[in-house]
Amino acid sequence: MSIQGVSLADKKSIIIDFLRKCNAFSEQKLQDYERRLVGAEEAESIELDHKKHDWSSYKAFNTYAINELKGSELDDWL
């Protein structure tokens, strides 16, 4: 089946499911970095904080996109 044969609602559902899986992975990464921060040296701590920031930003972006997909804002793209 071509992508054109998939309903708009199904497309949104597929994308939202994917983004939720991405956010679950992000959460795992954030927890890992948080665990590694305990007892980390200063240089490593700075690097881990930076990675936490990046993953938090990625997760926030995905959450924003999910909310946009729940409305009609991105319908023209799909």
Image (spheres, helix red, strand yellow):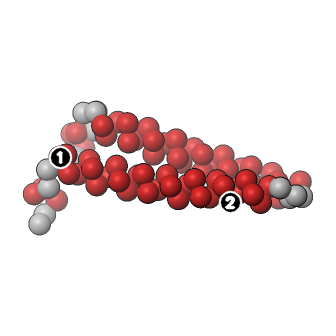
* Place of residue 35 in the rendered image (x, y in percent of width and height, measured from the top left): 75, 57
Residue annotated with mark 1: 8
Name the amino acid, label 1.
Leu
Secondary structure type for disc 2 = helix
In which image quadrant can residue 4 be found? bottom left
Of badges 2 and 1, the one in the foreground is: 2
Name the amino acid, label 2.
Asp
Which comes sooner in the sequence, label 2 or label 1?
1
In which image quadrant can residue 29 be found? bottom right
Left or right, 60 with respect to 6, comes to: right
- Residue depicted at x 23% and y 51%: 11
Left or right, 18 with respect to 48, comes to: left
- Residue depicted at x 26% and y 47%: 12
Residue annotated with mark 2: 32
* Place of residue 52 in the rendered image (x, y in percent of width and height, measured from the top left): 67, 50
- Residue depicted at x 62% and y 49%: 54
Return the residue nearer the eye: 10 or 58.
10
Of all residues, the one furthest to the bottom in this rendering is: 1
- Residue depicted at x 27% and y 50%: 13
Left or right, 73 with respect to 26, comes to: left
Rounded to the nearest angstrom, the CA distance separating label 2 from label 1 is 36 Å
Within-10-Å neighbours for mark 1: few <14, some 14–19, many 20+: some
In which image quadrant can residue 75 be found? top left
